[in-house]
């Protein structure tokens, strides 16, 4: 009896030469550190599995990796994961990922194809508070996440206020307000009719 391969393949499933040949033959496409069959949609669940190839199941995709999984940011390098302080997980150091130990209650994460990802709201809060200025285009990613999750700056402000020990709340609030303005400006431009002949 043959074993069915997963939705995202790695070198644990097939040798790299075979995966490379399949890509050249147009049978698979690269997705993060994995490979997917052409009939497999590039969706949030597929991206969660692809990112999860790097870590044990207890790890939670967060910040820019979560934003990539939701389809609103480019593939980050390195990937960003966290583990809950109560979880006993050993993840060997790797140049391919950043790992933080955080408090992450169940309501701050979702499960996609068996992999844990921070919710869009938690992702927005974490990106706004922790990503250094000048890294990627943080406010564009935040604006896209606000639109993806249909959230307002006030929704995020309430969430930030509920986090008693979270640093950089003022920085986050300013970034969220600018992201909301960016999102509103983009929406206005989309609503205006084009002046083509």
Image: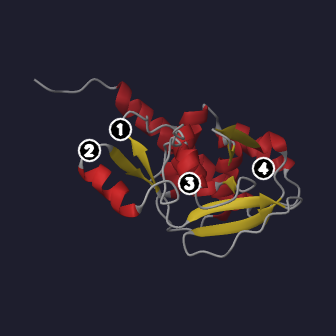
**Mark 3 element type:** helix
Q: Which residue is mark 1?
A: 38
**Mark 1 element type:** loop
Residue at the image position 83 percent from the left and 43 percent from the top: 106
Real-space Cα separation, disc 3 to disc 4, in angstroms: 27 Å
Residue 92 placement (x, y as % from top left): 68, 73
Residue 115 placement (x, y as % from top left): 67, 45
**Mark 2 element type:** loop
Real-space Cα separation, disc 2 to disc 3, in angstroms: 22 Å
Looking at the image, is mark 3 or mark 4 earlier in the sequence?
A: 3
User: What label sits on residue 160 in the rendered view?
Assistant: 4
Q: Which residue is mark 3?
A: 51
Is disc 3 surrounded by few (<14), some (14 to 19) or many (20+) residues within 10 Å?
many
Q: Is residue 167 visible?
A: no
Residue 39 placement (x, y as % from top left): 38, 33
Q: Quadrant of residue 172 in the image?
A: bottom right
In depth, the one of 194 and 74 nearer the eye is 74
In depth, the one of 187 and 28 nearer the eye is 28
Residue at the image position 51 percent from the left and 42 percent from the top: 5
Real-space Cα separation, disc 2 to disc 1, in angstroms: 8 Å
In depth, the one of 72 and 5 nearer the eye is 5
Q: Which residue is mark 2?
A: 26
Looking at the image, is mark 2 or mark 3 earlier in the sequence?
A: 2
Q: Quadrant of residue 19 in the image?
A: bottom left
């Amino acid at each position: 009896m043959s074993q069915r391969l997963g939705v995202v393949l790695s070198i644990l499933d097939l040798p790299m030469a075979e995966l490379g040949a399949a890509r050249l033959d147009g049978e698979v496409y690269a997705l993060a550190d994995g490979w997917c069959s052409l009939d497999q949609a590039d969706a949030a669940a597929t991206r969660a599995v692809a990112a999860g190839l790097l870590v044990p199941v207890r790890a939670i995709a967060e910040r820019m990796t979560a934003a990539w999984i939701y389809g609103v940011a480019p593939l980050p390098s390195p990937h960003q994961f966290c583990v809950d302080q109560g979880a006993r997980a050993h993840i060997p150091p790797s140049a391919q990922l950043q790992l933080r130990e955080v408090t992450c209650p169940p309501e701050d994460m979702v499960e996609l194809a068996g992999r844990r990802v921070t919710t869009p709201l938690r992702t927005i809060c974490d990106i706004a508070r922790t990503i250094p200025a000048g890294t990627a285009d943080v406010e564009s990613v935040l604006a896209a996440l606000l639109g993806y999750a249909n959230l307002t700056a006030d929704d995020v402000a309430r969430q930030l206020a509920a986090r008693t020990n979270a640093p950089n709340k003022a920085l986050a609030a300013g970034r969220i307000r600018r992201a909301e303005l960016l999102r509103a400006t983009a929406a206005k431009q989309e609503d205006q009719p084009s002046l083509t002949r």
